[in-house]
Amino acid sequence: MIGVDWGTSSLRAYRLDAAGQVIERIATQGGILSVTDGDFAGALRGTIAPWLANGERRILLSGMIGSRQGWIEAPYLPCPAGAADIAAALVRVPFDGADALLVPGLSDSDAAGTPEVMRGEETQIIGVLANTAEATACLPGSHSKWAQVAHGRIASFRTYFSGEAFAAMRNATILGRMMNDAPNDALAFERGLARAEDPGHLLNHLFGVRSLGLFNRLGADESGSYLSGLLIGHEVRAALPRGGIVHLIGAAPLCALYARAITRAGGTPVIEDSEAAARGLHSIGASAPWR
Amino acid sequence: MIGVDWGTSSLRAYRLDAAGQVIERIATQGGILSVTDGDFAGALRGTIAPWLANGERRILLSGMIGSRQGWIEAPYLPCPAGAADIAAALVRVPFDGADALLVPGLSDSDAAGTPEVMRGEETQIIGVLANTAEATACLPGSHSKWAQVAHGRIASFRTYFSGEAFAAMRNATILGRMMNDAPNDALAFERGLARAEDPGHLLNHLFGVRSLGLFNRLGADESGSYLSGLLIGHEVRAALPRGGIVHLIGAAPLCALYARAITRAGGTPVIEDSEAAARGLHSIGASAPWR
């Protein structure tokens, strides 16, 4: 089968054998925002034409391709949900010459009734944790997801706006005007993590990025890493109150920062490999109602 | 004397009689950022020329005019500080034909040693609370200030980045892309305040602005007010843990929103009049070392 992780700004396609091993892979910047006139079928065909010519007839797609801005909206499936639940809720899209199915996103709700949503991350979590009795997964990013897995199903999850908050603070506030573009500064990142442990609200701690700069106690090459540590530290301490093992799924540099924050908060990080989506697509595809 | 509250983007000048009553006032958009070639003396002279012609010889200036970006940097004075302490730390600037003095900003430090700064707000607080034994003041804005006053002196203060965080979320994130420019929606603001009372971190609550919109439970005309309530609610609950009277100093519409949040958090808001700066300039001027 062919598995496609098709997000807003990128596309990753995998040709998988019956055991779920990746035979070939294609990665492009052709995210759903780059598709013109809604011609997702044409864009997909152009990307995976060689594999179709080789006889592949099953295509499973996850990510924002199943959103309102994508091909067809695949309605959110409420938690708890595992691979079989997701496979039963796949949405077929018209595609000549192959059977193409969309993975739905998942929804959840907190005690106050505020909704939670994910789309794409469920496939990665299934890829890593489908055979796990109890686990915590963290998928850092613009909208970081923290999920609880029970008996191989995603039981519940919460979203933290940390990544997009960082970008907004960096690009649109006085804090960013004091920052150089600089590589990660491990010591400044650690100082931000330490600050997140102090009493006081994030909204107060944010102002410290400016005041420390005014007193020459935080340099322009350091303040971006400090802000990153402050936000990640706040997120991890809120999401992981009791320690425990956390499976990190995502880009390696960001996972390394989260691993440090999790360790500091008393948890045990496990950085998972980067082909979680391919494995999740295989797991879900194994139960899919292929024609 | 002449009192001038000279900020980044505006200037307010007051001609005061010996009892501190405002005889005349001038308000312009001529903030320090609008002054070219550092000619603050020229800009000031142009603004208050009629009063100088009438014989005024004492000018006291507060606000960002005393910052690194202003006329001369007046170093921060550490808390605790009252009118007499501030008057003893005024910084003289060269100005032909009158004696011109700059009010220093104040600094403080939290238990972890992170600095706090204000510049301009100290004069407004002195204007309202110089004769008060014990009081809490809140000056809402881009960088909201919460100050404790004891025996007429500003004992300590904390800054919350709420106003600038709101603007950044509004202008530079996916949350803002779901918002119309709309007048304040009192019910949506209240829902944001209520959300701030729920368990969970602000970084999680922020994502709810998006997820509620996805499920059509928060409209494009409502989500700005909801976000405002969420941020102000978080700030007030963090800054005012034990209730009590809060003196609100600032723009009337914003003070009204904070008053609602303070009431909901168990506090008692008192909205002060809008000429706090004029009264503070008079109080400090009464102890100033005029030539």
Image (cartoon, coloured by chain):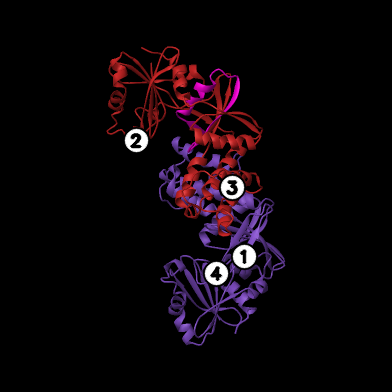
Chain colours: A purple, B red
Q: Chain of mark 2?
A: B
- Tell me the element at label 4: loop
Residue at 59% x, 52% y is B204
Q: Chain of mark 1?
A: A
Q: Nearer the viewer, residue B264 or A216?
A: B264
Q: Nearer the viewer, mark 3 or mark 4?
A: 4
Q: What amino acid is labelled 1 in the image?
A: Leu
Q: Nearer the viewer, residue B49 or A229?
A: B49
- Tell me the element at label 3: helix
Magenta-colored span: B115-143
Locate residue B255, reporting x and y percent: 53, 34
The CA distance from mark 2 to mark 1 is 49 Å
Give the label on residue A106, or none. Answer: 1
Q: Please identify the quadrant where the C terminus of chain A is shown.
A: bottom right
The CA distance from mark 3 to mark 2 is 33 Å
Residue at 65% x, 32% y is B243
Q: Are the residues at dot 1 and dot 3 in contact (C-beta closer than 8 Å)? A: no
The CA distance from mark 4 to mark 2 is 49 Å
Q: Is residue A76 visible?
A: yes
Q: Is residue B140 visible?
A: no
Looking at marks 3 and 2 on the same chain, the residue that comes earlier in the sequence is marked by 2
Locate residue A262, reporting x and y percent: 61, 53
Residue identified by numbered label 4:
A73
Locate residue A290, reporting x and y percent: 60, 82
Both marks 3 and 2 on one chain? yes
Residue identified by numbered label 2:
B33
Residue identified by numbered label 3:
B202
Q: What amino acid is labelled 3 in the image?
A: Leu
